[in-house]
Image: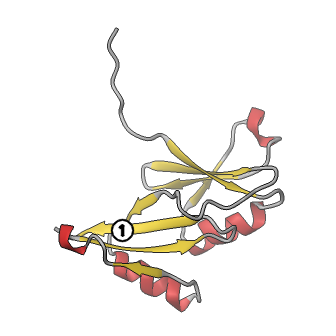
Amino acid sequence: MTYNFYGLDHVQLAAPEGCETEARNFFNNLLGWTEIPKPETLKKRGGVWFQCGTHQVHIGVQKDFVPATKAHPAFHVQNVDSLREYLLQKNIQVIDDEARADEGVKRFYLNDPFGNRLEFLEWLS
């Protein structure tokens, strides 16, 4: 039996019940990700899905939600400095991290509206 891994299909971020409007404001209106339809069979669970580049990000409702403050997805961005400046202009707090600068990686973190940690990075070399 042989098989191959192609990579990630999607990333799921948890959020509290009733999160959809705030998720749309952040991921669609602020970051510019396109909302994509959820399958009919999953709509009753709540949440909302977005397209980010070639990958999907699913915001899923979790009962007794607790944000992921350490575990996080990292989003590869072209012109990460422009994104950082845009977010700062929108009063979004970012956390710069130069720990991988010697590898040619420029990156920062932020928390989504639900407290989940998100990383944005660009490979410069």
* Dot 1: element: strand
- The amino acid beneath tag 1 is Leu
Q: Would you say 65 lies left or right of 125 here?
A: right
Quarter containing the N terminus = top left
How many numbered circles are shown? 1
Q: Quadrant of residue 85?
A: bottom left
Q: Which residue is mark 1?
A: 121
Residue at the limit of the structure toward the top, as seen here: 1
The image shows residue 28, relative to residue 53, as above or below, that is: below
Residue 78, quarter of the rendered image: bottom left
Q: Is residue 23 left or right of residue 104?
A: right
For residue 33, above or below residue 93: above
- The residue at 50%/81% (across/down) is 94
Q: Position of residue 32 (x, y in %)?
A: 54, 68
Q: Position of residue 14 (x, y in %)?
A: 67, 53
Image vertical order of residue 42 relative to residue 107, above or below: above
Residue at coordinates 57% horizontally, 87% vertically from top-left? 90
Quarter in which the C terminus is drawn = bottom left
The crowding category of the residue bearing disc 1, from other C-alpha atoms within 10 Å (few below 14, some 14 to 19, many at least 20), is many
Residue drawn where x is 52% and y is 57% of the image: 71
Residue 6 locus on image (x, y percent): 35, 33
**Residue 28 visible in the current orientation:** no
Residue 47 in view of the camera = yes
Image-based side of 31 in relation to 24, left or right: left
Q: Position of residue 29 (x, y in %)?
A: 62, 72
Q: Nearer the viewer, residue 57 or 104?
A: 104
Foreground pick, 63 / 43: 63
